[in-house]
Image (cartoon, coloured by chain):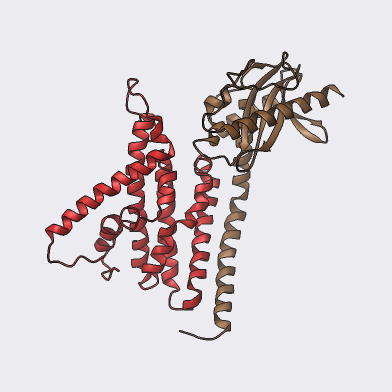
């Protein structure tokens, strides 16, 4: 795993080299589910960034006191608490969004990215670096969601963030807002990323790429 | 690491108590706001059923439109929302509907005119159908179909009939046959029972 703690490296890993969705292939469920609209994806991503960053921070803060054999229970408790905070916040201040996201907010807790970061990073690193790591992973996730949602919303509704951009002439592709589209667009995005990353590796031949 | 037996238990208890306290506090401090939002949501849906458009989407306007147009009367031991005109005469009833969908119960209201001749509108307050399939019952195109359906000619409580069956008045949702079927069943049953009870008074 990562050794260096410089913010630049943390973000480079979270967003690109070790992107949770594209490289680690985790957090796929929600990536498929909420990406038919950009706004849903953005809120979901922001919610996840918040939860991942703060739960990583908290896990890291108490990592020296936490008995090793109950650490997963502790992590789940912390993650659940932050997810409920997000849920309460949305219900109170963004009721429309809360309704649109519905069950997905509760499902943030089952997102592998959060626990993955808590286990893989926050358990071994200082709080600030862990916070940034959570933020970076969440950001990586959000960016991928937005890319997929951009393609789906543009072709499915002819709009971006609900604002119509393609004129009347555009015939919406209904399949884009249906579940199957999420599968093949995600696959295409992963395919493109893999190609670029492989090329990068070839150029750095000889260097050991940490992953 | 500490190997004691009691430490992990005490640790977990303290941590749980700490987070529970934070959540309880947050829940307490936002409870009013959340219940206000829920009430507003319900107001909006009831206004929609009776096809009343508030002058704007502002919470104050919605509450005002609600208070001006909608009241409740006791019926069958429960309050029943009604749409009343300027002289407090009843123009329509909001009949509560509920039944089981594909994944869970579906709840909502259907508006019936005071002479039981027309379905004024329909909206759902809660459901857990698959988004994009059965979940489309809450989309506008589906709900709009229930505007002003004449039910005087309906036989055997078959008020909602999906096209293209004879006498059909509403389109079902493609790919969500079970949800559509269930919606028409409980809407028909609930309207039928409501009219029978009202007329039996």
Q: Quadrant of residue B83?
A: top right
Q: Is residue B12 above or below residue A145?
A: below
The outermost residue toward the front is B165
**Chain A painted colour:** red
Percent from the top left, x then y, of residue B37? 59, 41
Q: Is residue B30 left or right of residue A75?
A: right
Which image quarter holds the N terminus of chain A? bottom left
Q: Residue at x 74, y 22 (%)?
A: B157
Q: Is residue B2 above or below residue A131?
A: below
Percent from the top left, x then y, of residue B25? 59, 59
**Chain B painted colour:** brown
Which image quarter holds the C terminus of chain A? bottom left
Q: Quadrant of residue A25?
A: bottom left
Q: Quadrant of residue A147?
A: top left
Q: Is residue A54 above or below residue B157?
A: below
Q: Is residue A25 left or right of residue B64?
A: left
Q: Residue at x 45, y 67 (%)?
A: A58
């Amino acid at each position: 795993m990562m050794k260096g703690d410089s913010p630049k490296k943390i973000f480079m890993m979270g967003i690109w080299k070790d992107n949770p969705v594209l490289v680690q292939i985790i957090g796929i469920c929600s990536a498929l589910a909420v990406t038919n609209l950009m706004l849903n994806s953005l809120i979901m991503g922001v919610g996840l960034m918040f939860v991942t960053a703060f739960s990583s921070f908290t896990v890291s803060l108490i990592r020296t006191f936490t008995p090793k054999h109950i650490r997963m229970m502790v992590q789940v408790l912390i993650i659940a608490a932050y997810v409920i905070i997000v849920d309460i916040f949305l219900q109170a201040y963004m009721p429309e969004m809360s309704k649109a996201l519905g069950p997905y907010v509760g499902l943030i807790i089952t997102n592998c990215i959060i626990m993955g970061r808590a286990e893989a990073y926050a358990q071994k690193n200082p709080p600030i670096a862990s916070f940034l790591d959570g933020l970076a992973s969440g950001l990586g996730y959000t960016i991928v969601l937005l890319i997929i949602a951009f393609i789906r919303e543009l072709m499915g509704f002819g709009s971006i963030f609900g604002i119509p951009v393609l004129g009347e002439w555009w015939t919406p592709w209904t399949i884009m807002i249906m579940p199957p589209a999420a599968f093949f667009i995600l696959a295409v995005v992963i395919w493109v990323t893999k190609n670029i990353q492989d090329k990068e590796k070839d150029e750095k031949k000889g260097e050991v790429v940490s992953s | 690491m500490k190997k004691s037996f009691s430490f992990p238990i005490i640790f977990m208890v303290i941590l749980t108590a700490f987070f529970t306290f934070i959540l309880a506090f947050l829940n307490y401090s936002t409870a009013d706001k959340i219940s206000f939002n829920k009430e507003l949501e319900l107001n909006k849906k009831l206004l929609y059923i009776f096809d009343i458009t508030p002058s704007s989407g502002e919470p104050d306007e919605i509450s005002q439109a609600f208070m001006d147009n909608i009241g409740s009367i006791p019926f069958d031991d429960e309050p029943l929302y009604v749409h009343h005109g300027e002289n407090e005469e009843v123009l329509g009833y909001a009949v509560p509907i509920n039944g089981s969908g594909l994944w869970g119960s579906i709840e909502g209201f259907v508006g019936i005119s005071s002479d039981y001749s027309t379905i004024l509108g329909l909206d759902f307050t809660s459901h857990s159908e698959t988004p994009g399939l059965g979940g489309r019952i809450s989309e506008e195109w589906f709900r709009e179909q229930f505007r002003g359906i004449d039910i005087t000619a309906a036989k055997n409580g078959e008020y909602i009939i999906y096209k293209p069956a004879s006498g059909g008045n509403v389109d079902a949702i493609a790919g969500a046959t079970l949800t559509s079927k269930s919606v028409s069943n409980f809407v028909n049953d609930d309207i039928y029972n409501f009219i029978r009870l009202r007329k039996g008074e």
